[in-house]
Amino acid sequence: MPPRVPERSLTIPARKLLDKVDFDIIGTLRRNARQSNTEIARQLGISEASVRRRIGRLVAEDVVQLTAIPNPTKMGYNAVAFIAMDVPLNQLDAVTEQLAARPEVQFVSTTTGRYDIFIWAMFKTAGDLHNFLRNDLAKIEGIAQTETFINLEIKKRFLG
């Protein structure tokens, strides 16, 4: 059986390849996304206008997202889990869209291998996780089976 491959391209279109300066800006943002464009420009030896323009392009082309990465425990989320799902291929898009719209779901990915979709979700209590599994996921047509992996401890929260 051939591997399942998402329909969307996983690469940047050839007309918009990233160069060394783009990668340097991304690396600088990964270390500290709160620093100013002026500070990034000083570190990289380029103009502030170039940094501003490039960051704008990187965001617009969905190469990077500038966002806060929460610490679930410190925010009161005591039940954090990865949930794997079996979904028929012809329902992947519909199911992922519904999952992505849920406020407790922080990450949605279609995958190859044993499961078709993985999500990462945060809940205040184990009871909230239980209700999500039994009530909310049960209402989404196309989810054939799930397996839940509860996070015991998060060692690294950075996505980049």
Image (tube, rainbow, N blue to C red):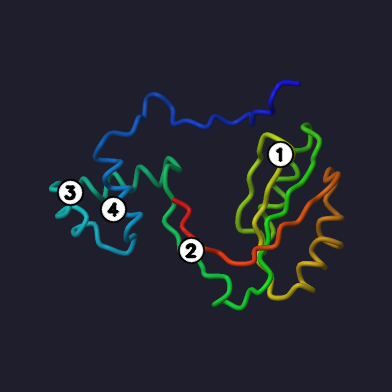
Query: Type of residue at label 2?
Result: Ile
Q: CA distance from mark 4 to mark 1?
A: 34 Å
Residue matched to label 1: 93
Q: CA distance from mark 1 to mark 2?
A: 26 Å
Q: Earlier in the sequence, mark 1 or mark 2?
A: 2
Q: Earlier in the sequence, mark 3 or mark 4?
A: 4
Q: Earlier in the sequence, mark 2 or mark 4?
A: 4
Q: Which mark is residue 44?
A: 3
Vertical placement of 77 versus 105: above or below? below
Label 4: which residue? 28
- At label 1, the amino acid type is Asp
Residue 11 vertical position relative to residue 126 in the rendered view, above or below:
above
| x and y, in percent, of residue 68 in the image | 46, 64
Of the two numbered discs 2 and 3 on the same chain, state the one appearing first in sequence: 3
Q: Check disc 1 and report its element: helix, strand or loop.
A: helix
Q: Residues within 10 Å of mark 1 (few under 14, many from 20)?
A: some
Q: Is residue 15 above or below residue 52?
A: above
Instruction: Give yes or no for contact between labels 3 and 4 (Cβ–Cβ under 8 Å).
Output: yes
Q: Nearer the viewer, residue 37 or 117?
A: 117
Between 69 and 61, the residue placed more toward the observer is: 69
Residue located 79% across and 40% down the image? 87
The kind of secondary structure element at disc 3 is: helix
User: Pointer 2: what residue?
Assistant: 69
